[in-house]
Every structure is written in structure tokens, then in C-alpha cells.
Amino acid sequence: MNDQNHVFITGGNKGLGRHIALKFAREGSHVFINYNSDDEKARETKEMIEEEGGNITLLKADIGNTKQLKEMLGRLPAIDIFIHNAVYAKTAKVESIEDNDWEKSMAVNVTPLVKISRHLFYSMKEKQFGRIFAISSIGSTRAIPGYMNVGVAKAAEEAVIRYMAAEWGPYGITANVVSPGAMDTEAFRAVFQDKADLRLEQAAKRTPAKRIISFDEVADVIYHYSHPAFSMATGQNIRMDGGAHLLS
């Protein structure tokens, strides 16, 4: 892979996004990290990457805000690899979801995937190379109680990825979904709150490996699928749940 790749990650200042950024930076890419509000975590990530000699640019913006998203896109250079990792995780049962939370979920989880990818398309087309990833979850295909607001948005993300894979394939652009199993993320804890530890324990027991997946494992897979050798792997949902979906 070209070690001068520009990689853009939404929600890249902590958790899974941070580990993806670290992986690409360690391999020589310049990483551009979007984040919304946690300046301290963003600074930590920047320091971690720079201490290892990596290149990083922070882009603070609420991508669910149309004006801020547009301004951020104006600061982005040509990007080779885009990972949409940001998530709005506030959810509830169908009958109790608030209008604002529903609209915010679509505005953060789905719309930026379309608008950012569309913005990056032209430079990717010119280079005849591009990699686009969306992070999804099992809730996109299964009705997990109380998870509707995230699950529906993730299903929409997966549909968007399929269309991009089909329409942009002739230009050397691939688009894939990565669906990790349960991970100990802030988003996971925001959804399940005081039941998060129990949920993680149950998820590990349902997995043949008897453990949950690590951030680094997900980052490694995204890195490898970004390689030119994976140019025919597109429109896929790459499940990384240790085979849990086979047993339930």
C-alpha cells in the first residue's frame, strides 16, 4: 500500500476510531481525525500518534450539523481511505424514541456517510483508487430490544454502502461494511448503561472463541481490506463476531 495514503476517520479520537487511526499512522499514512466534543481524548490521540512519528490532523466538527459538516469538508484534502465510525447511540423502544433523537441518529449515522463519500468521490475517481468503510452492528439485521434508533441507522448505512460499491466499482473504489461483535465502547455503554457489563459477558459466552473482539483486530482488518490487492472485495459485510452469528 502507498505509505502516503490520506485516511479520514469520523469519531476517530477514542475507542475503535483511535485504534484505527493508530494502525494507519504506524503504517505511514497521514490520518485525519474528525471528532465532535471530547478535546482531551483528541489531544491524547494526537500525542500518541506524534510520539510514534506519525502524521495526524484533527478536525473538530459536529458532522450531524449541516453547516459544520460542510466547513469541515472544505478543510479536507484528497482522501484515499474513508472510515465512517462516528455514531449517535442514544436509543429507546419504538414507542418511546424522541423525535430529536431519531433525527439526530439519521443526521450523524447515515447522512455524513453519503455526503462525505460524495465529496471524496471525485478525487478517488481521478486516482482510480478509493476505500470506503462503514462500521455497523448486528442490530442492523436483528431486532434487539431498545436498540431501534441505532439498528435502523446501521441498516441504512449498509444499504448506502451497497449502492456505492455497485456504482463506483468502475473507478477503482470499493465500499464495505465492517460489523464487529460486541465491543466495550462508549456507544455500547451508552445504549445498555448499567447492563453493559452483563451484555458483554453474555456476548463473549455466545461466541465460539468465548471472548469479545478487540479494537486492534477490527483496525487490522480494515487496514488489510484497504490494500490494492483487495480491489475485488466490495459490497461486503465483513462480520467480525467470532462466529457468534452462526450460533444464534
Image: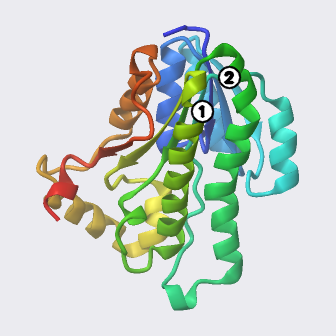
Q: At numbered mark 2, what does the secondary structure look like: helix, strand or loop?
A: helix
Q: Quadrant of the C terminus?
A: bottom left
Where does the image place residue 227, in percent across and percent down from the top left? 44, 18
Q: Is residue 30 above or below residue 37?
A: above
Q: Amino acid at mark 1?
A: Trp
- Residue 120 drawn above or below residue 91: above
| Residue name at image x 33 percent, y 56 percent | 182
Position of residue 216 in the picture relative to residue 121 (left or right) = left
Residue contact at pointers 1 and 2, CB within 8 angstroms: yes
Classify mark 1: helix, strand or loop.
helix
Q: Residues within 10 Å of mark 2 (few under 14, many from 20)?
A: some
Would residue 34 be seen by someone viewing this image from the given angle? yes
How far apart are the two marked residues, 1 and 2, measured between alpha carbons?
8 Å
Say which quarter of the image contains residue 222. top left
The amino acid type of the residue labelled 2 equals Lys
- Placement of 230 over or under 37, stated as above or below: above
Residue sitting at x 54%, y 72%:
149
- Where residue 142 is drawn, which disc sits there? none
Horizontal and vertical percent position of residue 67 = 88, 52
User: Which residue carries the number 2 mark?
Assistant: 125
Q: Is residue 133 left or right of residue 199?
A: right
Q: Between residue 132 and residue 220, name the one nearer to us.
A: 132
**Residue indicated by mark 1:** 168
